[in-house]
Image (cartoon, rainbow, N blue to C red):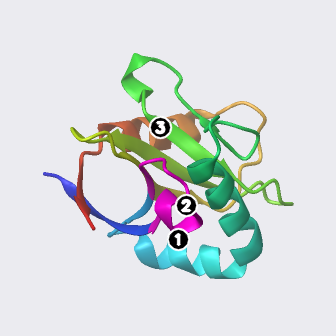
């Protein structure tokens, strides 16, 4: 069954010609939006740069793929005391649109390498299929 996600920001809103969009998983939207409100300035800075710059991957937004099964998983990294992250699923459509879906919030990442708990989150997100609501 496909999960639903809601588009909350597009590159066009920043005056960019890229067809990139930021979405939020409908099921986990409440906790993700609470974090966005708490870390508003940093979050929107990361989003603007990710949606509008030619190089999509950088320090605060990067791929988390461990193997072929986990392709298309990325993370928004806040680099705060708790190393908060929002794990995302990247989805492309037939018309060239690129969607970054904020899927699961991880309030604290205490290990340098991905431990078993984080690997399970990444594999879980990789298995998600999304229906995008504009």
Q: Residue furthest left?
A: 1
Q: Which residue in the protein does label 2 denote?
A: 105
Q: Earlier in the sequence, mark 3 or mark 2?
A: 3
Q: Residue furthest top?
A: 68
Which residue is at a point 62% across and 37% down the rendered structure image?
54
Q: Which residue in the protein does label 3 denote?
A: 73
Q: Residue furthest right?
A: 81
Is residue 114 a member of the stretch shown in magenta? no
Residue 64: horizontal and vertical position, in percent? Answer: 57, 33
Give 78 or 52, whichever is nearer the viewer.
Answer: 52
Give 86 or 6, whichever is nearer the viewer.
Answer: 6
Is residue 19 a member of the stretch shown in magenta? yes
Task: Give the CA distance from mark 3 to mark 2.
Answer: 13 Å
Mark 2 crowdedness (10 Å alpha carbons): few <14, some 14-19, many ≥20: many
In this rendering, would 49 be left or right of 83? Answer: left
Q: Please report the bounds of the magenta region as a residue range.
A: 9-21
Placement of 37 over or under 84, stated as above or below: below
Residue 51: horizontal and vertical position, in percent? Answer: 56, 52
Task: Give the CA distance from mark 1 to mark 3.
Answer: 17 Å
Task: Give the CA distance from mark 2 to mark 1.
Answer: 6 Å
Nearest-to-viewer mark from 3 and 2: 3
SS for tag 1? Answer: helix
SS for tag 3? Answer: strand
Q: Which disc number belongs to residue 32?
A: 1
């Amino acid at each position: 069954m496909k999960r639903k996600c809601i588009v909350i920001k597009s590159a066009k809103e920043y005056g960019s010609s890229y067809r990139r969009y930021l979405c939020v998983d409908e099921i986990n939207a409440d906790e993700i939006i609470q974090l966005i409100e708490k870390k508003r300035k940093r979050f929107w800075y990361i989003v603007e740069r990710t949606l509008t710059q030619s190089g999509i991957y950088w320090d605060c937004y990067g791929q988390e793929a461990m193997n072929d099964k986990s392709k298309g998983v990325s993370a928004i990294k806040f680099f705060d005391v708790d190393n908060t992250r929002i794990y995302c699923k990247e989805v492309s459509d037939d018309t060239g649109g690129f969607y970054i879906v904020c899927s699961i919030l991880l309030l604290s990442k205490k290990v340098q390498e991905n431990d078993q708990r984080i690997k399970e989150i990444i594999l879980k997100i990789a298995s998600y299929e999304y229906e995008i609501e504009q």
